[in-house]
Image (cartoon, helix red, strand yellow):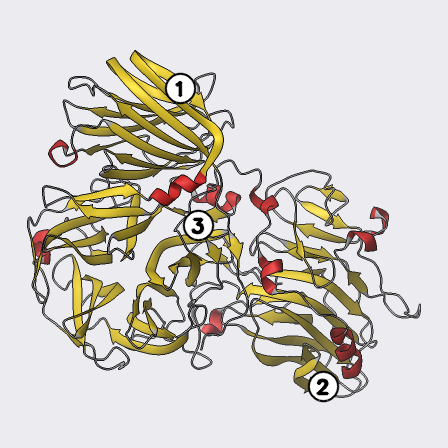
């Protein structure tokens, strides 16, 4: 936990201790006779909390202050999914009975380790329990929830169905020792009950009450992963069992707001985070990986992506979803897909909903093909599964099940599907038997027929094309113009590693496709980016038929730094793809819509007739667009840009081109005075002057810790850097010989994110 001592003046706290905040509104329940143990009432409204002296509950979080959001009546507490919980002292008398009740809006089911169902550790919505005592209102990673209760007669569990997502619900659990009756309620109605022998007293746990944290942690790589990602309001514990009518009456008195108003991540959570991008698309918090399934549907672009919604770690993968009209401003949608079970012990995607693509059919339906993984060998593990949506905004999906397994391959993943020649086609990244990476290829007449996919011969000479990988991931296959196609893959494993040589990065080939066979112009791949750092783009076409791609720019700092930040990874700026004049090279450019991010009146425009060495041009903060044009690009000496420089020159990043060696170099040796970066400090890449021309124009987008670079409106690369000083915002140019420069720059505003998290259903 980040240790912070701070007086919080917002509604959730009046007195703070190290990493925790006392709740002045926590008090003993009223109207209780003195001979029974008191209950507890937690509310998050400032007008209901009169004095810090009465505080008994503590909010724990690693962030500067707890999250406040709109509640069912006033303000509510928003958990972050992994680091936040509430603890409070509570004493329950064995024979008095009790009621625990409260309002919860759950954004996603909790994470867990990717293990069989009998090894998972369900998360607790609220509990005072240990292995053999107390009570636990729990929910597991598959949405199954219930009440576990221990009495002197033993322990029993009430199991309910799937817990509702993305909306406020009222939960309650009661136990009456006299009758031995335990009941679980949802929105005022019973959803399960059990009975002990009458007179069986509660077996209280000798521990604190915990909200949003379980008594039994699930730990992965040293991180607790089974927290609760939700909003809470009005938690009450009474030392008697309320009747059904009393519980129903309390629910009927409240009309809760829409879930989206309470599950949005408040700006305060990351307000002091100098590394978090503000205009690059990314989830609202926690962990993401590859974007995929980029499609246009009506006036909207839809982007799906790999997501752990509950913390900055990778497990139990979901398909996140966001949509946009211009690929700049985005609306967060409910998660599209998440792991589910078909029986108590088995689900074909129970280990995660991994990458894939979305195909739109003439019948108006959208088909999401994704990589599914389970724990049972031989049962589509790994496999390709499909879900279907007729929703105009692709909010809700119905799972149809597996369509393929990896038969004939050592492994495979990440399908892309398209319609061609009266048939549906699918390629899947694969590990080939007896060799390295390649592709599986299938054809199908009717996309709605799960059994129609037939394996085909390989579409290309993969053994000649591979660069020493174990498997190819995230393939892209699109017509690129002039009778050519582009085939792009992301080789990983064996000789390839994130910081090695070869490095993990996207590679591509240009060639001809006859509907059966792809013949690359050259079996040697080209690099998507000049310098590695951006990979796994997902692509589609705009209304004019032009290709647009969005990839990931992953973290280059330690896992500990990612956990401390509370988020990991971002997407690159959208890029326009085209075939260059040589007919063999991909050209990439930024979208014109990014101009909408410029802040009027906050810009720099300078012409420098002659300069040499480092030359500062301006300071527009940590979110800036820079266009540099070298009027006479040198042919015999390096030149380029300086970014993220501090006034005392202790931090700076250089990006230079050597025209003699035809090499672009990113020098991060002084980027960060901290020690949480883990990537190489100097990275170089070969630049093809014949295809791209001598670098004269550098178009650079800096967004806190992520940078996108476009050279001559044709070559591109993206990278991460982490200046530790908030004053490391100066930018300029550098040259080893005298040059003339025109530089224009604009301060950029953040994305106008909105939330649309109304409840959807996935079967």
Mark 1 and mark 2 lie on one chain; the one further toward the N terminus is 2
Q: Is residue 76 visible?
A: yes
Q: Is residue 273 above or below residue 417?
A: above
Which label sits on residue 282? Answer: 3
Mark 3 and mark 1 lie on one chain; the one further toward the N terminus is 3
Q: Is residue 404 above or below residue 48?
A: below
Residue hosting label 2: 196
Residue hosting label 1: 617
Which quarter of the image is occupied by the N terminus? top right
Q: Is 517 in front, or is 307?
A: 517
Q: Is 173 in front, or is 487?
A: 487
Q: Is residue 626 above or below residue 200?
A: above
Quadrant position of residue 172: bottom right
Q: Are marks 3 and 1 in contact (CB under 8 Å)?
A: no
Which quarter of the image is occupied by the C terminus? bottom left
Outermost right residue: 34
How many numbered circles are shown? Answer: 3
**Residue 453: % across, % down:** 20, 77
Q: Residues within 10 Å of mark 1 (few under 14, many from 20)?
A: some
Q: Residues within 10 Å of mark 2 (few under 14, many from 20)?
A: many
SS category of the residue bearing label 1: strand
The residue sitting at 44% across, 82% down in the picture is 343
Q: Is residue 557 visible?
A: no
SS category of the residue bearing label 2: loop
The residue sitting at 26% across, 55% down in the picture is 544
Of tags 1 and 2, which is closer to the observer? 1
Quadrant position of residue 593: top left
Cα distance between the residues tagged 3 and 1: 30 Å
**Residue 632: % across, % down:** 21, 19
User: Is residue 280 shown left or right of residue 758?
Assistant: left
The residue sitting at 32% across, 67% down in the picture is 370
């Amino acid at each position: 936990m980040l240790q912070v001592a701070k007086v919080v003046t917002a509604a959730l706290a009046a007195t703070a201790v190290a990493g925790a905040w006392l709740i002045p509104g926590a008090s003993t329940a009223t109207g209780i006779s003195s001979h029974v143990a008191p209950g507890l009432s937690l509310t998050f409204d400032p007008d209901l909390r009169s004095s810090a002296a009465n505080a008994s509950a503590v909010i724990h979080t690693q962030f500067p202050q707890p999250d406040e959001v709109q509640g069912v009546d006033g303000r509510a507490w928003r958990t972050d999914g992994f680091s936040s919980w509430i603890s409070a002292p509570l004493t329950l008398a064995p024979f008095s009975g009790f009621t625990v009740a409260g309002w919860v809006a759950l954004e996603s089911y909790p994470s867990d380790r990717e293990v069989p169902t009998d090894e998972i550790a369900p998360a607790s919505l609220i509990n005072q329990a240990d292995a053999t005592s107390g009570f636990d209102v729990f929910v597991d990673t598959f949405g199954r929830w219930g009440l576990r209760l221990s009495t002197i007669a033993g322990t029993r569990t009430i199991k309910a169905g799937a817990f509702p997502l993305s909306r406020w619900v009222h939960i309650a659990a009661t136990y009456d020792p006299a009758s031995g009756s335990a009941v679980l309620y949802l929105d005022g109605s019973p959803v399960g009950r059990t009975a002990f022998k009458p007179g069986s007293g509660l077996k209280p746990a000798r521990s604190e009450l915990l909200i949003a944290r379980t008594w039994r942690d699930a730990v992965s790589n040293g991180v607790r992963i089974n927290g609760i990602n939700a909003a809470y309001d009005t938690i009450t514990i009474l030392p008697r069992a309320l009747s059904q009518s009393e519980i129903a009456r309390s629910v009927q008195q409240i009309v809760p707001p829409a879930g989206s108003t309470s599950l949005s991540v408040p700006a305060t959570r990351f307000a002091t985070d100098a590394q978090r991008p503000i205009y690059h698309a990314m989830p609202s918090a926690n962990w993401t990986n590859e974007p995929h399934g980029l499609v246009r549907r009506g006036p909207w672009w839809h982007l799906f992506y790999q997501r752990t919604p509950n913390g900055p770690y990778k497990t139990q993968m979901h398909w996140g979803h966001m949509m946009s009209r211009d690929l700049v401003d985005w609306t967060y949608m409910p998660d599209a897909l998440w792991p589910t079970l078909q029986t108590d012990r088995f689900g074909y995607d129970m280990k995660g909903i991994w990458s894939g693509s979305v195909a739109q059919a003439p019948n108006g339906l959208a088909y999401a093909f994704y990589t599914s993984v389970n724990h049972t060998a031989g049962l589509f593990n790994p496999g390709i599964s499909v879900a279907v949506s007729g929703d105009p905004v692709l909010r809700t999906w119905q799972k149809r099940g597996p369509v393929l397994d990896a038969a004939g391959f050592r492994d495979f993943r990440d399908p892309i599907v398209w319609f061609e020649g009266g048939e549906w086609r699918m390629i899947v990244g694969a590990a080939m038997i007896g060799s390295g990476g390649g592709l599986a290829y299938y054809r199908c007449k009717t996309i709605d027929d799960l059994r129609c996919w037939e394996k085909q011969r390989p579409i290309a000479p993969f053994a000649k094309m591979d660069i020493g990988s174990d498997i190819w991931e995230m393939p892209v296959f699109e017509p690129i113009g002039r009778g050519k196609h582009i085939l792009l893959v992301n080789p990983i494993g064996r000789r390839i590693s994130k910081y090695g040589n070869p490095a993990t990065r996207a590679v591509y080939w240009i060639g001809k496709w006859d509907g059966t066979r792809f013949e690359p112009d050259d079996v040697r791949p080209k690099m998507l980016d000049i310098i590695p750092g951006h990979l796994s783009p997902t692509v589609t076409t705009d209304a004019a038929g032009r290709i647009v791609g969005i990839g990931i720019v992953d973290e280059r700092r330690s896992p500990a730094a990612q956990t401390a930040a509370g988020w990991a990874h971002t997407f690159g700026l959208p890029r326009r793809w085209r075939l260059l004049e040589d007919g063999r090279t991909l050209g990439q450019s930024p979208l014109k819509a990014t101009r909408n991010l410029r802040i009027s009146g906050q810009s720099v425009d300078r012409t420098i007739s002659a300069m040499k060495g480092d030359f500062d041009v301006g300071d527009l903060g940590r979110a800036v667009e820079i266009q540099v044009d070298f009027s006479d690009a040198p042919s015999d000496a390096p030149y380029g840009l300086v970014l993220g420089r501090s006034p005392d020159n202790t931090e700076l990043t250089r990006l230079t081109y050597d025209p003699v060696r035809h090499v672009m170099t990113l020098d991060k040796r002084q980027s960060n005075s901290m020690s949480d970066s883990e990537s190489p400090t100097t990275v170089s890449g070969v630049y093809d002057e014949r295809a791209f021309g001598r670098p004269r124009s550098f178009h650079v987008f800096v967004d806190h810790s992520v940078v996108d670079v476009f050279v001559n409106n044709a070559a591109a690369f993206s990278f991460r850097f982490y200046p530790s000083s908030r004053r490391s915002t100066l930018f300029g140019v550098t040259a080893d010989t005298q040059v003339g420069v025109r530089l224009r720059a604009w301060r950029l505003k953040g994305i106008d994110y909105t939330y649309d998290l109304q409840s959807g259903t996935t079967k």
